[in-house]
Amino acid sequence: MSATKAYAAPAANIPLEPFTLERRAPGAHDVQIDILFCGVCHSDLHQIRDEWGGSIFPMVPGHEIVGRVSAVGSHVKGFKVGDLAGVGCMVDSCRECSSCKEGLEQYCETTGMVGTYNSREIGTGQPTYGGYSQQIVVDEKYTLKVSEKLDLARVAPLLCAGITTYSPCASGK
Ligand SMILES: [Zn+2]
Ligand SMILES: [Zn+2]
């Protein structure tokens, strides 16, 4: 576990304020990312205002995340420390249903997709916290490679808004 500085909405319609959260220590398949940029999505506003109902507070929004890998689990194959990585709107799903097996995890039929924030981890039930924070720990299956050639501030919004226009069915929120 590591203490991570973040900004959280303490309740609906209350401005974000400094917040400290605990990220899990990277498991065997996890990538730990030091966040460099996080986009602001309109769905962040909907959720911190509880306009869709069921919001979990305190809430750390942010699902357009780009950063640099600072640790990897022992079984991680696709990333090493120092790589750039991105995280979009989901961080887990059941991985076993027909939708997950087709690469359509956003339609997961068993657990549903686990949102990057305002959702609950499978197993622990702990709330997920998003990218308005210094660090995130995500399974490498839900982590994207990012090229060193790109302007990272411009990459961040591609993780949600960009993928939505590229493939509407790939965006969970
Ligand atoms: Zn979004
Ligand atoms: Zn599934």
Image (cartoon, rainbow, N blue to C red):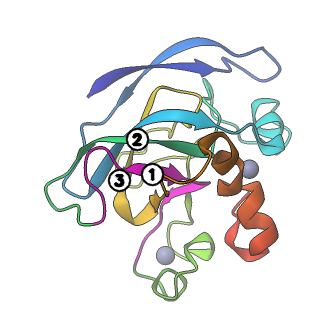
Which numbered disc, 2 or 1, marks the residue that appears first in the sequence? 2
Mark 2 and ligand 1: say if the CB distance to the nearest ligand atom is below 8 Å.
Answer: no
Q: Dot 1: what SS?
A: strand
x and y, in percent, of residue 140 in the image: 35, 60
Q: Are marks 2 and 1 in contact (CB under 8 Å)?
A: yes
x and y, in percent, of residue 17 in the image: 65, 11
Which numbered disc, 3 or 1, marks the residue that appears first in the sequence? 1
Task: Specify whether 57 is left or right of 87.
Answer: right
Q: Which residue was labeled with disc 2?
A: 68
Tag on residue 123? 3
- Residue 29 seen from this side: yes
Magenta range is 78-95
Q: Is residue 129 above or below residue 13?
A: below
Quarter of the image holding residue 76?
bottom left
Q: Which residue was labeled with disc 1?
A: 85
> Distance from label 3 to label 2 (Cα)?
27 Å
Q: Is residue 69 magenta?
A: no
Q: Residue at x 74, y 57 (%)?
A: 173
Indicate the amino acid at tag 1.
Ala
> Distance from label 3 to label 1 (Cα)?
25 Å
Which numbered disc, 3 or 2, marks the residue that appears first in the sequence? 2
Indicate the amino acid at tag 3.
Gly
x and y, in percent, of residue 123 in the image: 35, 53
